[in-house]
Image: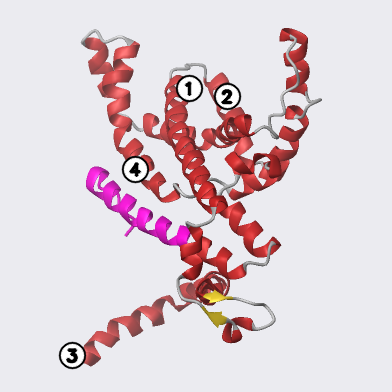
Amino acid sequence: MHGTRKKPWKKELRHNWPLYVLCLPALIFVLIFAYGPMAGLVMAFQNYKPWQGITGSEWIGLDNFARIFQYEESTQAIMNTLIIAVIKIVVGIIVPIIMAILLSEIRNVGLKKSIQTLVYLPHFLSWVTVAGIMIDILGLDGGINHFLFSVFGTKPVFFLGDPAYFRPTVIISDLWKNFGFGMIVYLATITGIDPSYYEAAEIDGATRRQQIRHVTLPSMLPMIIVISTLSLGSVLDAGFDQIFNLYNPLVYSTGDIIDTYVYRSSLLNGQYGFGTAVGLFKSGISFILIVISYRIAYKLANYKIF
């Protein structure tokens, strides 16, 4: 019995070995850069000192994890992450749905493709580029403040330096950059709807608004459920690239998130063990949320990867 089990595997390898060789570089890359660094997670349980190394640093157990909830900065970073991420997820689902429905109603193909390209284009810009643009137009002497002063006579607003304005600025800029991608996904779903459903609704006297309500939205529901549930896995990911390129010490109270806090704590302040503990805490919670979200997506929409 043992020999018969090995034959199919050997036969598969003999016939498809070129494909496995092609996968080998990617596998080595993942092992080196994804799994190799995980050995450093032991620092989360140590009072790590670079000159002592992992083997020589003092073992302190769960003390670093306990400190997460003792520091006001760390708890504030967790709250900021949840607030920013949840709002991003909600807005990032609703706006693409609305835009996809509106765009699907345009009958001029040229205009439709032009709008689709324009709203999708920012998705390809890096946050370094977007941040540079935003700093220029949102600065005290930027275009937005010049417009507000010339039209309404208001005083300059420091959008990126005022804690009250920083979160809305982050959320709106993230929406502008990324909603085009979500819109494409929903637009593809609308394109795949059977036209006979609309024909039947039109014969029954349904208006365009009623067709959207009773045909388009129900047909989009499975995809909406899948994207919404899978978004739970990123509820602790508020966007390091964006925040890091936009924030400053003036807005730490409302803009500092877990990832930027880990960066400052470990790399800038030398608290490597504590920074690793915060990052591991976030990764553990995110892993649990991802598992839950996939289970929900499978139950509600029969969505599965494997």
What residue is shown with label 1? 103
- Residue 153 picture location, percent across and down: 75, 10
The mark nearer the N terminus, 2 or 4, is: 2
Amino acid, disc 3 = Met
Colour pattern: secondary structure
| Residue 127 circle label | none
Q: Classify 141 as above or below 163.
A: above
Tell me the CA gap for discs 4 and 1. 22 Å
At x 40%, y 57%, the residue is 285
Query: Which one is in front, 287 or 71?
Result: 71
Identify the residue at horizontal 42%, vertical 62% (top origin).
Answer: 284
Please, which residue is most extreme toward the right here? 141
Residue 115's disc is 2
Q: Is residue 255 above or below residue 218?
A: below
> What residue sits 53% from the left and 22% below the top?
112
Give the CA distance from mark 4 to mark 3.
42 Å
Magenta segment range?
Answer: 281-306
Is 93 covered by the magenta stretch?
no
Badge 4 crowding class, 10 Å Cα cut-off, few under 14, some 14 to 19, many 20 or more, is many
Residues at badges 2 and 1 in contact (C-beta under 8 Å)?
yes
